[in-house]
Image: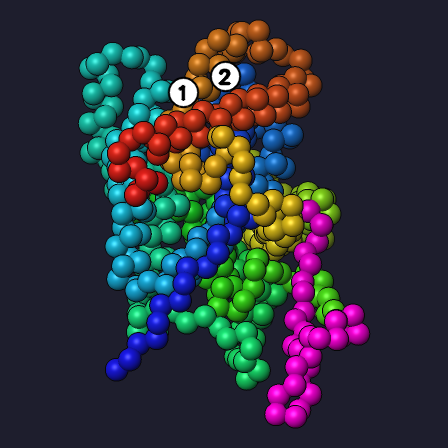
């Protein structure tokens, strides 16, 4: 039985490379914002700012959470489809075990305890060793930021299994010249347009039992957001087969070039018949600035709708409970749908923006795509160390030069200044460390 020849590797997508680099920097700044007044799980919180007094940070975190990791999973799904288009499923899984499984285990066992060690009150051998033994004893799954690599490894493994069953060896790319009815295409279009509503509905019901902030072992992933990650990975994977260059959504505008504007020599003659050249529709996402404005403005609905519902129903909102995280209530329902709405608005716009303006090889000495994975794995260790050092010098347990009691500093300016400066410094150090690790440590290029 003859097998189809292996297609050549697809051309490098510089826009996706640059987007991934940007997202790594974005993640570092996002995690830094938690230390300076944001909500979320992070080992360190500054003594200068409190998590319940930061209105300038919370909208940024909400918008970042709504689309940041979803874009990561879309890119991962796309890259996995690329790999499976020119290699076998078994080779694909072996490579993923090396690049995802090994770093996940190593980070969980050795790196994450060092991250936690930065926050120890006492720095002596007996205390550190006792904390380390306790950490190893309590391990029941992955720890820290490698939840992403663990979830991705599971998705890649399941995808490879499906591909091996349905396509025997590797996935087949769609023939763009075929005019036959393709139900895959209709399924993909329906998923990209209406899928976010299904994701929002499922996420709302999941949060009844697993509210936002609940991590489930052994992957240490939040089920509250897991549905979006699977949705994004699926769209990214299917986009290659459907000939889509980027993440598309329901708010994209379609443009069909007029055939009168095509040059005369684009028509061909075949067996005496006049065959017009096929005209492809092009899609344009919302401008990035407009998408950002829509996302930030609609975020206010998460506060307005629950208040309106409380007024209509006569049941006052209990502000002592963070009802937006989950449960059968208007706050949780509104946030679940806003989160997916923001993703489907911002995701295509961000990707379209990078496709238009950042689709060339990175020229920076530091911000190179080949260092982005290493920077992602190293940034918690470096970030927490920098944040502890800065807090010790400038805050000093709430008594330092930056620990003022002026409301505008504690509520607005302080968190914003610290998040921006320290976050960008953390990203720089992470990429510098990754550059040294990939460039000078033997064998790291195969893994990172």
Q: Where is residue 42, by image quadrant?
A: top left
User: Eyeballing the image, is 373 above or below 268?
Assistant: above
Q: Position of residue 81 (x, y in %)?
A: 42, 61
Give whichever of 392, 211 is nearer the camera. Answer: 392
Q: Magenta part of the protein: which range?
A: 259-288
From the image, which quarter does the N terminus lie in? bottom left
Residue 81 belongs to the span the image colors magenta: no
Q: Left or right of 319: which side holds 174? A: left
Q: Left or right of 216: which side holds 323? A: right
Q: Position of residue 364 (x, y in %)?
A: 53, 32
User: Eyeballing the image, is 49 above or below 291?
Assistant: above
Q: Position of residue 375 (x, y in %)?
A: 42, 34
The residue that label 2 is drawn on is 47
Q: Left or right of 309: which side holds 245? A: left
Mark closest to the chain's N terminus, 2 or 1: 2
User: Eyeballing the image, is 272 above or below 382?
Assistant: below
Q: Left or right of 332: which side holds 436? A: left
Question: Looking at the image, which residue is at 67% across and 13% down?
Answer: 406
- Label 2: how many Cα within 10 Å (few below 14, some 14–19, many 20+): many
| Secondary structure state at the residue bearing disc 2 | loop
Question: Looking at the image, which residue is at 59% across and 48% down?
Answer: 359
| Secondary structure state at the residue bearing disc 1 | helix
């Amino acid at each position: 039985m003859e097998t189809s020849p292996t297609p050549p590797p697809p051309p490098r997508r510089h826009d996706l490379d640059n987007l991934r680099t940007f997202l790594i920097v974005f993640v570092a700044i996002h995690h830094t914002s938690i230390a300076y007044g944001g909500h979320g799980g992070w080992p360190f919180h500054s003594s200068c700012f409190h998590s319940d007094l930061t209105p300038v940070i919370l909208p940024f975190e909400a918008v970042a959470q709504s689309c940041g990791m979803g874009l990561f999973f879309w890119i991962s799904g796309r890259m996995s489809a690329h790999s499976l288009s020119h290699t076998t499923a078994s080779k694909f899984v072996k490579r993923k075990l090396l690049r995802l499984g090994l770093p996940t285990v190593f980070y969980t066992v050795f790196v994450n305890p060092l991250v936690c060690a930065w926050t120890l009150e006492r720095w002596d051998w007996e205390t550190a060793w006792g904390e380390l033994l306790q950490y190893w004893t309590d391990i029941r799954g992955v720890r820290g930021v490698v939840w992403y690599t663990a979830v991705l490894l599971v998705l890649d493994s399941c995808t490879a299994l499906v591909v091996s069953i349905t396509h025997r060896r590797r996935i087949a790319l769609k023939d763009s010249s075929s005019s036959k009815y393709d139900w895959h295409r209709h399924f993909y279009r329906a998923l990209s347009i209406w899928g976010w509503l299904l994701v929002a509905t499922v996420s709302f019901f999941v949060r009844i039992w697993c509210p936002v902030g609940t991590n489930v072992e052994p992957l240490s992933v939040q089920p509250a957001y897991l549905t979006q990650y699977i949705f994004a990975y699926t769209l990214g994977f299917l986009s290659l087969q459907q000939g889509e260059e980027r993440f598309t959504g329901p708010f994209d505008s379609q443009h069909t070039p007029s055939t009168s504007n095509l040059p005369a020599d684009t028509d061909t003659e075949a067996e005496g018949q006049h065959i017009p050249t096929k005209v492809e529709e092009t899609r344009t996402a919302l401008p990035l600035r407009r998408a950002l404005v829509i996302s930030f403005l609609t975020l206010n609905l998460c506060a307005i709708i629950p208040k309106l519902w409380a007024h209509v129903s006569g049941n006052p909102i209990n502000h002592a409970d963070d009802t937006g995280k989950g449960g059968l209530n208007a706050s949780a329902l509104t946030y679940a749908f806003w989160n997916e709405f923001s993703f489907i608005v911002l995701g295509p716009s961000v990707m379209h923006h990078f496709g238009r303006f950042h689709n060339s090889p990175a020229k920076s000495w530091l911000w190179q795509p080949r260092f982005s994975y290493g920077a992602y794995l190293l940034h918690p260790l470096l970030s927490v160390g920098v944040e502890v050092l800065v807090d010790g010098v400038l805050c000093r347990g709430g008594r330092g030069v930056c620990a003022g009691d002026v409301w505008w500093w504690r509520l607005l300016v302080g968190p914003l200044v610290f998040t921006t400066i320290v976050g960008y410094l953390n990203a720089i150090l992470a990429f510098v460390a990754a550059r040294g690790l990939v460039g000078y440590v033997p064998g790291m290029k195969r893994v990172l």
